[in-house]
Amino acid sequence: MAMAVFKAPLKGEFHGARKMEGKQYKHHLLQQQSTGRRRVFVQTDTGCVLGVELDRNDNVHTVKKRLQIAFNFPTEESSLTFGDMVLKNDLSAVRNDSPLLLKRNLMHRSSSTPCLSPTGNDLQRKDRSGPIEILSHSPCFLSLKQTANDIVKAMKMGVEPIPVNGGLGGAYYFRDEKGQSVAIVKPTDEEPFAPNNPKGFVGKALGQPGLKPSVRVGETGFREVAAYLLDYDHFANVPPTALVKITHSVFNVNDGMDGNKSREKKKLVSSKIASFQKFVPHDFDASDHGTSSFPVASVHRIGILDIRILNTDRHGGNLLVKKLDDGGVGRFGQVELIPIDHGLCLPETLEDPYFEWIHWPQASIPFSEEELDYIQSLDPVKDCEMLRRELPMIREACLRVLVLCTVFLKEAAVFGLCLAEIGEMMTREFRAGEEEPSELEMLCIEAKRLTTEQDVLSPKSDGEGETEFQFDIDYNELDSVYGSETETDEFFAKNPFSNGRSSLGELKESIAEEEEDDEEEAKLTLSLSKLSTSMKNNLSNTMGSGYLKPPKDNQTDKALVSHKSANVQLPLSVNFVKLADMKEVEWVVFLERFQELLYSAFAERKTMTLRNTQRLGTSCKF
Ligand SMILES: Nc1ncnc2c1ncn2[C@@H]1O[C@H](COP(=O)(O)OP(=O)(O)OP(=O)(O)O)[C@@H](O)[C@H]1O
């Protein structure tokens, strides 16, 4: 049953348009390589942004020196990071237009540290970039370039952006000369809990675990862009989205990490890294009205995207609805669906997704031939290559989630499962107040167990020079964010956001932790034993009883306490299985084992659906 998903080439028909424009892009890359000149955008962990021109001779040291002058703070006590990578000295991996993060070490930051914006106008003078700079020369963003030009023209005429009232994060409608909204801009440092959030949800530095523990503060913007880039041929209708460096006085800058005081009165100009999405005129969203008028194809296409990117936030408000005709008095005619807000997709670990469409009748209708062709044309390896190229800051952990979910989708579609069935297999259930792993997670747990039994995991194959993923970096990051071991313990004791381990990576192991692991193990075994009979039967039939062995990486991210700041109450979130802690060789074996387990899991799911349909009677068929 396992398909050769990694060998399947991309089919031209779905990706043709972007391929055509690729030549121009390649030319740009070659030019850049030959001169060694690059421009990067350095963002401090409190949100301030500066464009910096690099030449061939630059290294981390020389760049930090320049930043020290510009930002007016000692940069030797800080680290420069680029996605997963902490840059030591060499800058050759850094690509043109990349955003870099300058993080101060903990001892130099306190919650009262003001956001770095020492002399806004000075900074602007040193930074020669324009008011809106798209952080890519890729042809994928050509239409947005025009939108950006229209906005700049309008700004010169005095047309001001309008802050968006709803939502937890800072967002702004930018307008054209006619005063019409043409783009929605969401600065990364105004996300929920980020230092410059305008709605009082503050308290964390960029790079720390955010609203969802598996999505770091300041990293929702590139996810929005990833969703657009992965939506080949606008199959799901994601509005064009780019990462930009944008400068305007409308943006919010707080006085301190924990402060709600913005410097609104001063109205200083500030530069931000932000997601920049085409504004799509619409009539309402999917939470406002009944869903029966939604076209089956639109629901399927959006569902296919949500599955690939493990969207944890597809609620009704994130599906805009545009009426295409007037269906007569009191009736809706044709509508178009526009999926927005993909900031919480591609988490760093497997999470509980949220698929609003899961119980819509459209999701139970089999995929069409065209949809099946599209799914089969997907190539997760090429997707990763493309994302690494376009969004070099993307974390390997996110890419693994993308690969796993795409493999799952492809295999499930070949087997004949419908959208609802696939979504259900990915979704966790709550039983007796406890969250249980989804069927997908159970399969991963088992695949991981089988992987560890392989020869490749013997010490000699512990690959030298293997890629180290962000979990390794996390230890350092957490040390620098939360301090030394003692400080860390104290932090976690005070901060129920964590259960004493990083939500994104384990901290040092200790004897106490092993004891805790035993307890967790017992708890999880109990939890797993309560799993749906489908999974249990299925797994025990195909794998023997060993499958109940619980994972070692169970983590709970607990609620935060005080009002609004990062100490707001957040729901519990459990991490049943990590993907990024596997070395490359283990990951490949894991994927093989995973695919081998799928057939019987799908068969069992199909049997369950049939049983339920028979029990409910034909009237429940859509
Ligand atoms: N591309 C778009 N075109 C038109 N309107 C949009 C677009 N994107 C967002 N909006 C509008 O802006 C509102 C806020 O956007 P969005 O939900 O993406 O922001 P958010 O800050 O992430 O919100 P939340 O905290 O609810 O997740 C949406 O409810 C929608 O009305």
Image (cartoon, rainbow, N blue to C red):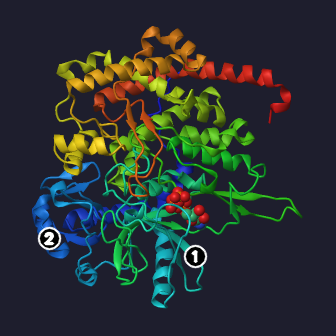
Marker disc for residue 171: none
**Viewer-side label of 2, 1:** 2
Residue 368 in view here: no
Q: Amino acid at mark 2?
A: Gln
Q: Quadrant of residue 333?
A: bottom right
Of residues 107 and 189, the one nearer the viewer is 107
Q: Amino acid at mark 1?
A: Ser
Of residues 479 and 3, the one nearer the viewer is 479
Is 211 drawn above or below residue 201 in the view shown? above
Identify the residue shown where x is 56% and y is 31%.
430
Dot 2: element: helix
Of residues 205 and 315, the one nearer the viewer is 205
Q: Give the labeled residue for mark 1.
A: 181
Residue 496: give x, y in percent of width and height.
Answer: 36, 43
Marker disc for residue 68: 2
Dot 1: element: strand
